[in-house]
Amino acid sequence: MPTHLLTLDDALLLRVLSFAAERDVEAVTMASRLVALHVLPQYPEIWRVLFARQWEKLNFPLDAKTENARNLVVDARLRALFPLECTDARIFQLLTHAIVQLPSGMDIGETQRSRGYSDTHHRIVPLEKKKSEGQDDDGVVTTFAFDGRRFGNDRSVRANVPFPTSLYIAVFKRRVQDFANKKQSFVYQIGATTSGYFEISISNPISRPSPHTVRNGRVEMTAIGLVPSSFPLVGKQPGWIIPSFGYHGDNGKLYSALPLEPFGPQFGVNDTVGCGIRHSSKDNGRRVFFTHNGNTVTSRYLPGSGRYIPCDKKHEWFPVVGLDSPNTIHVNFGQQPFKYDHVIDELFSECVGINALAARQMLQNANKARFHSVRHNCIDAFIANILERRRLTTAFAAGMATSLFDLGDELLVHVLSFAAPRDVESLTVASPLVARDVVPWFPAIWENIFRRRWEALNFPLDSDTLLQINENLDALFPSSCTESRKLQLLTHAIIPVPSYADIRETQKALGYTDAYHRIVSLQAPDLRESHAVDFALDGGMLGDDRCVRANMPFPTTFHVAVYKRNPTEEDKVQGHTRPVYHVGVVPGGYFELSLSKRQHRHARAPSMFGQEAMTSIGLVNSKFPLVGKQPGWTRRSHGYHGDDGRYYHGTPFEQGQPFGPIFKSGGTVGCGIRINPRTGTLFVFFTNNGELLSGEDGAYEECEHRNWYPAVGLDSYDALHLNFGQEPFVYGAITDELFEECNDMATAVSEQLQWYDISDSDGESSDDEENNDDNDSGDGFGSDADMSDEELA
């Protein structure tokens, strides 16, 4: 970058940081003394705004982004946990990391998914503005009403998440008196508590139910309370089963494990009632309490002061509303001032005197709630260490104690090797030292990040095996481009590719049963069982065909690929005798299947129709039926079968074309897709024990332009092993053949390789993106796109 942050004046630098994410601000703070010692302490609004963003991301919106979130106020009892010299900016930074998801709305969708629900009897309608474009409609609302046709058929709506069970950061909107202007305003008060509270306000229905609505002789009513996750949301009101608690508006009674006794006033339209849970420091127990129109509800039938109902600690308690009335319900978790305002002081006073323990528990909550672990991020670890020890010096309070300028090159490289990609890039922008003297001369920094990213999305790489950019890809970069810069660009271009067998997809297929189709993972204990490349059939009968496909289809455009390759003769002459991971860009792909004998429990198992044991290899599309078929038996699949050596494509059983030798245990077969990058034409090919197979029409069979998944057909008890490049291929020539496709294709490669953001943990799980059949654009070609394989066959 031609301009570094150090050259910007304070106002412009503040403006730049106001748009940055929290991780970027922290990285810049470590890299720049200017930011750490001068900017952040003087401009706490940077971290106040970041706190507001993180809170809104996990919980509810704040009217706090205007005027730099000045109406966010840290409660004095929470502020007392920090040293006096700790700046507001530093406090908001630490609190931002401690935010967890809290109850913030009612999950209508959970009720709709409950057993016994029907729109006719239990329909619940949201009564708030539709979410803005770009926001997920997750069924979580704060204003809603019952709109079913039958009263008396009870139903409940619970919150999106339960109240936390340990200390956490809470934000409540609160009215304050502005004596200077003689008017009321509001602030968002930030504190720490182990308890929780919410209120519901009841108002007239928007439309009265039809006089023909069935009432079952019941009086309209609403209930408020707490329930565990196992509580049935249809057919029950809070408190009707143990464990649960409910305060009912039709009779003012409390329903729980206690004997049914009079409790409080009845409630209905124009009333506000609340329910909370408190932690008792005396016996470490928990207590439930209720409020009515701003006052606590007490009863002489309750123990002690008559306010609290004991509850067990083993459950997580969800706020809940019971509905059997058409009235409008508005739920408040702190988005608006509470009617019972004293509850804020009661909750926030719990952190008084617990000091270091509070910081430790906040850290534990933050680590559990954050989507990714902090172990790969040196900046998060540094903050964790500070929270754990609670020893902030004046220098710490101002920013970070040690600037990167004070570290030697080798130590700086070691620090950056633990940083996430985003941090490394932020430090490069913020620090000329990192940009000029460190990153270009230490390519191991970006090589480590490349490896982590590849492993997060695809398959593991041996840490002691060399990784290098293939010469064909290297020739596409300008001569002035450093090794670090190449690896950085390639890291951002990594996408999920076929890497393991998706056994779960077969288990979800129509017709699957464990009795006939069970597939077991033979994965080593230190590898992820769900990401199996070693597996076998363990069903009770052969002949009832089934397939396993890969986690992803082969990409049909240029993409980053990593293949492990044995040294060539030329490499050996130069003294390189160990395998190397080669990084290149390829269209299409290739995989191999190795078979071996296995001891199994079905040695005497019968074979349906007297068929011989067989295994097949091939390609299938996303709609291929994984139970009852072998690859090649439909038009949307290609298969090479081991029992007869025939090639199948839309051809029934035993009617394939003569193609190659039969294969069984002890052999290795391969299948791949070659793509002509100039015409886009796709070709399927097969190999057997390192030899390219050739049929009547040659080695390469043209195939439709679809998203093709690698697939294996199982109808034998052999142990199967898949290789997607994590090991050298038996057909070793394929690596060079695929890598050479990019020669003289610099324009196409630059257009087809996309720059993808890298998540905070150096890569998100490919499980989040895989197998999205609804977006399987490759299946949209041709007039038969919406037809099933059974219709096509």
Image: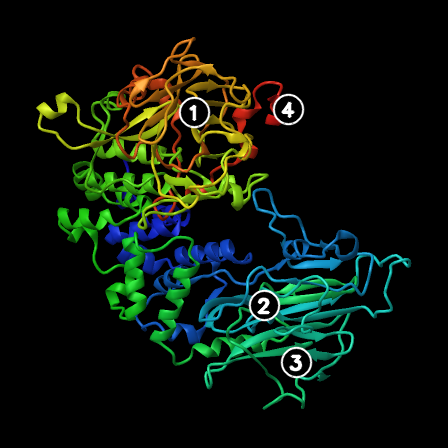
Residue type of the residue flagged with mark 3: Asn
Query: Would you identify the image quadrant in which residue 674 lies?
Result: top left
Identify the residue at image location x=49%, y=82%. 280
Identify the residue at image location x=64%, y=73%. 274
Query: Up-down: is 413 above or below 738?
Result: below
Which is more foreground, mark 3 or mark 4? 4
The disc at residue 228 is: 2
Q: Is residue 745 left or right of residue 472?
A: right
The residue under label 1 is 643
Cα separation between marks 2 and 1: 55 Å
Residue type of the residue flagged with mark 1: Asp
Q: Secondary structure at mark 1?
A: loop
The disc at residue 295 is: 3
Cα separation between marks 3 and 1: 80 Å
Q: Secondary structure at mark 2?
A: loop
Quadrant of the frame with the N terminus: top left
The residue under label 4 is 791
